Amino acid sequence: MSSKCDFRPRFCSSKVFDVIKRFYDDYVWDNRLSFRQALEYFEDISEGVIRPRLGSGRSVDQAWRSCKGYFYEYAVCRALDEILSSDPLLSQKIDIVHGLKLEDNLNLRGQVVIKNWSDILPDVDFVIVNKSCNKAMAVMSCKTSLRERITETAFWSKELRPKGIEIIFVTTDKDEEITSSDINRYAVMHVFDCTVITDSNRYKQIIEEWKRKYGHREDFYALVSRVISFNDIERILHQYARKC
């Protein structure tokens, strides 16, 4: 496993997290999947395969709730790392750094923090770095469910954009919240630089629903292009590789 995906969660037992990661890796390898393919079915694999293997009981339920968000970040990281590993030219230009590792890279951390009496670190799950100029090109926020988190990410988008740092929101949208609220639709179409749906079937449903409702709008295709399937993330990474 690449060291970039070897991060220690803050609010999840390291022992439980290691078990979850091992179960996930074994499932991917045993079923001859790529990590990109496994990410598409994250909810099915996490809730239908990994969670039952942890056992039952209140303490296990609590541990799972504390760890699932980090587990999703791990699954996204393995898929991103797989993309970089399969494209040597891209991996020479782009690095993915987990937010929990920013303390080990003060230059990168300094690019991301908001300075106001003290350093305020935004909601950063990953930083996409152009290695040629050692510049943070974008931060990624990974959430399986939106709830109030989408407005939090929208706030950080406003604060980071003047720094030249883009916001990428990554989600399974498991509760179909992107299309259930005009506020959520506005955020992904107008506030975030890119929203990545890791479930390809859910991505198609979102686009089809919006096309029925808003396809006649003249700016529809320009705005909806900000929402992509994870299968298109490589194109975004190549764009960051060309910037400096």
Image: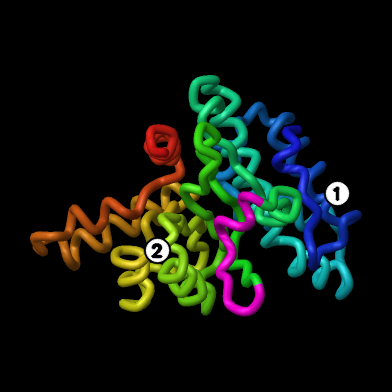
The number of discs equals 2
Task: Look at mark 1 in the image and give the residue it sits on.
Answer: 19
Q: Measured from the top left, where is residue 79 in percent x and y?
A: 59, 38
Mark seen at residue 177: none
User: Does residue 173 lie above or below 77 as drawn?
Assistant: below
User: Does residue 67 lie above or below 84 as drawn?
Assistant: below
Q: Measured from the top left, where is residue 60 in percent x and y?
A: 86, 67
Q: How crowded is mark 2: few (under 14 residues within 10 Å), some or many (20 or more)?
A: few
Q: Residue at the location (71% across, 42% down)?
A: 5
Camera-side residue: 198 or 51? 198
Q: Residue at the location (58% across, 37% down)?
A: 95
Magenta span contains residue 60: no
Task: Look at mark 2 in the image and give the residue it sits on.
Answer: 162
Highlighted magenta segment, given as a residue range = 107-118
> Is 210 placed left or right of 95 in the picture?
left
Magenta span contains residue 111: yes
> Is 78 placed left or right of 222 in the picture?
right
Q: Residue at the location (66% across, 50% down)?
A: 98
